Amino acid sequence: MLIRLKVENWKSFPLLEFSAIAGKERLHRERLANVSRLGARLLPIAAIYGGNASGKSNFFKALDFARQYVVDGVKPGQLIGVKPYALSMETLKSPTSFQFEILVDEVAYQYSFTVSRNEVISENLVEIRRTVEHELFDRQRERISFGKKLNASESLAVVGQGTQKNLLFLTNSVFQKREEFRRVYDWFQKTLLLISPRASCSAFDMYASSRCPFQPQNQETLQEFDVGIERIDTREVQSSQVPFQINVNIQRENAAQTEDAVFQIGPYLVRKKDDKQTIHEMVAVHSMKDDETRETFFELEDESDGTRRLLDLIPALTILRDAQTSRVVFIDEIDRSLHHLLTQKLIEDYLNDCASASRSQLFFTTHDALLMNQDLLRRDELWLVEKENDRSSLISLDEFRIRHDKSLLNAYLYGRFGGVPKFLFR
């Protein structure tokens, strides 16, 4: 789970602070995650509102950058793709800092790093147990020290000495097959799932090991929404049947794989085995109206934008509803191309399965003001991005004094909280 996030000097945010620790709000307490080791309850959901170009997506992109940088690293000599605030020479030349507090297998960690375009300036990992903190390692440029709790070996120190200046020590330690910090690394790689507005046809690596990425439980959820699709399946196609640019990407990825592999490019699932490749295309299966025993196949691009968006979201939301999961899903523009009632049902279905023992979280940006409803979401689960003088700030609705019987929707649309287009008040 994500406990807190703090980012400094990222895109339009001089400072971005987010907390999933529940406030004093009494509504919907039954669904809060109870983490006894922290002595806190964590929110299972957060909705982020704001006007166009306010900076909502920059929140998403901060997580996207951090995940890619931690998981994949960079090559020696390669620039770090950090994006500081660009409308000031002072901030443009200043480093960017990320601080994550996360829960992994009931243990809380604080992981932070500060980077410029050329190097890692600092990096730190701390284990947290209520008010007690145990430092595991601390890095100041090339110098790395280890905490007593870690009982680090000489070989781990060698890994530190061999870490390139533009690469995180956490990342390099996993690349060198060390296990000391793998649980934190795995949180970024396996627990954190980011879905952009342009996600393509359920292209999630978690499904790549099966023939059809759309699993049976997802098929059932799809049919609940009555979009006319019987199921999602795959059919084998020849390379010549694949669109040119996608085919180029497939061949490039195929050449980069040194061993047998399975990977997905858009709606195409590719298997490489013994230097031979097979390509399966995801298709939507419909029943013939004049003969229900017969079926026909539609390419996904023939389906509506809303249906394709639904296909992007269902697998992740289905996983979140699994009581055994500990996934953290962040969806940018969850309501894109979706009817309000459909978006609301997706959220309700997820929240109905949340309880004190749950360890999943759903965060999303949205313009759907009708979701700003205390019957659905708590005030501390609602966040606003406000932009002043080209600088974004994030604030929780819990910081406003609002009666429980007050219409949040009306107050928001009349601009009481901010986070709405500025032209309304000109």
Image: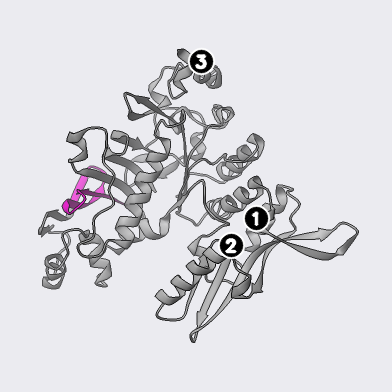
Looking at the image, residue 157 sits to the left or right of residue 417; the answer is left
Give the crowd class for mark 2: few <14, some 14-19, many >=20 residues within 10 Å: many
Distance Cα–Cα, label 1 vs label 3: 39 Å
Task: Identify the residue under disc 2.
Answer: 267
Task: Identify the residue under disc 3.
Answer: 414
Looking at the image, tell me whether mark 2 or mark 3 is earlier in sequence order: 2
Which numbered mark, 2 or 1, is in the foreground of this view? 1
How many numbered discs? 3
Q: Is residue 355 magenta?
A: no
Instruction: Report if residue 345 is visible in the image.
Output: yes
The magenta stretch is 107-134
Looking at the image, residue 321 sits to the left or right of residue 26; the answer is right
Which numbered mark, 1 or 3, is in the foreground of this view? 1
Asked whether the residues under the numbered discs 2 and 1 touch, taking CB atoms below 8 Å apart as contact, a structural biologist would say yes
Q: Amino acid at mark 3?
A: Tyr
Residue 337's mark?
none
Give the crowd class for mark 1: few <14, some 14-19, many >=20 residues within 10 Å: few
Q: Position of residue 162 (x, y in %)?
A: 14, 68
The C terminus - image quarter: top left
Distance Cα–Cα, label 2 vs label 1: 9 Å
Q: Amino acid at mark 1?
A: Glu
Give the crowd class for mark 3: few <14, some 14-19, many >=20 residues within 10 Å: few
Q: Residue at x 24, y 72 (%)?
A: 176
Looking at the image, tell me whether mark 1 or mark 3 is earlier in sequence order: 1
Closer-to-camera residue (207/216): 207
SS label for mark 2: loop
Residue 301's mark?
1
What type of secondary structure mainly makes up the magenta span?
strand
Q: Amino acid at mark 2?
A: Pro
Looking at the image, residue 285 sits to the left or right of residue 320; the answer is right
Looking at the image, tell me whether mark 2 or mark 1 is earlier in sequence order: 2
Distance Cα–Cα, label 2 vs label 3: 42 Å
